[in-house]
Image (spheres, rainbow, N blue to C red):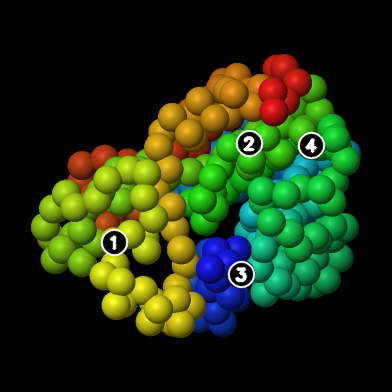
Amino acid sequence: MNTTQQNNNAWDQKVEEGSQWTKAVNHEIIEQAKKGNWEITVTTEKAVPKSWLPKDLAGVKILCLASGGGQQAPVLAAAGADVTVTDISKKQLEQDERVANREKLDLKIVQGDMIDLSDFEDESFDIVVNPVSNLFVKDIQPVWNEIARVLKSNGTLIAGFTNPLLWIFDDALEQQGILDVRHSIPSSTLDYLPETEIQAYLDSNQTIEYAHTLESQIQGQIDAGFAITGFYEDDFGGSRMLDKYIKIFIATKAVKVVENRR
């Protein structure tokens, strides 16, 4: 089974369905960004602290990784950065292209897989912005390694990811208000299904998601040559039962301090 192709198709379908993560920013947000009034998210609700990015983005080379959907890249481009956006989903990237054409933004668009950034040379970027997305790849260490490779020395990685506690509960029961621990970590959403239901799940163009350990998320960055210098948590904005008990999303700021240790 080709997980990459499955998730590519799934995200193309999400664009057609109008998922909130596929809705591009409007004209007013771009106009404000051009005036210096902007914000981006890499989780769900909270904005990335302005202190995590330079005050002046003019000429700063930013890679928005697995970041299609027209939400982060156009804003940063409007704020003056030299932005490249890459994503596995062509339709997600079309959202960025649409905003760039509408607003006359200089935005480079590259379709590709986050585990293979061979389209980019070593030390090409000052900043990598990676919204919650590494749940869609089975092994995330290659992602951290590739980010370290394309970042300049002392470059910054701003990454959003998921606390694996999200996956330990039975999803259907949680929707009924019952938190019932059913699953172990690491695991995948396919592990939670009876074998007889897996093919129907795949045929309906659902994403395959992977519950990664916090060690692979945090120590994985450190092993790739990063130092974690910023951290915050986020939630579903009150729409999930878990929000009453824990913030399930994490964002980190990390600085490349040593050469990639691959």
**Upstream in the sequence, badge 1 or badge 3?**
3
**Upstream in the sequence, badge 4 or badge 2?**
2
Label 1: few (<14), some or many (≥20) within 10 Å? some
Q: Looking at numbered disc 4 in the image, what kind of residue is underneath it?
A: Val
| In this rendering, the label closer to the viewer, 4 or 3 | 3
> Label 2 near label 1: C-beta < 8 Å?
no
Measure how far apart labels 4 and 3 are at the Cα level: 24 Å
Label 3: few (<14), some or many (≥20) within 10 Å? few
Q: Looking at numbered disc 3 in the image, what kind of residue is underneath it?
A: Gln
Residue bearing the label numbered 3: 5
> Label 1 near label 4: C-beta < 8 Å?
no
Measure how far apart labels 3 and 2 are at the Cα level: 21 Å
**Upstream in the sequence, badge 1 or badge 2?**
2
Residue 18 location (% of width, % of height):
52, 77
Residue bearing the label numbered 2: 144
- Classify mark 2: helix, strand or loop: helix
Q: State the mark number for residue 192.
A: 1
- Classify mark 4: helix, strand or loop: helix
| In this rendering, the label closer to the viewer, 1 or 2 | 1
Residue 250 vertical placement versus 68 (above, below)? above
Q: State the mark number for residue 150.
A: 4
Measure how far apart labels 1 and 2 are at the Cα level: 27 Å
Q: Looking at numbered disc 1 in the image, what kind of residue is underneath it?
A: Tyr
| In this rendering, the label closer to the viewer, 3 or 2 | 3
Measure how far apart labels 4 and 2 are at the Cα level: 10 Å
Give me the residue at 80% from left, 65% from top.
100
| In this rendering, the label closer to the viewer, 4 or 1 | 1
Give me the residue at 52% from left, 56% from top.
136
Label 2: few (<14), some or many (≥20) within 10 Å? many
- Classify mark 1: helix, strand or loop: helix
Q: Looking at numbered disc 2 in the image, what kind of residue is underneath it?
A: Trp
| Residue 198 image-quadrant placement | bottom left
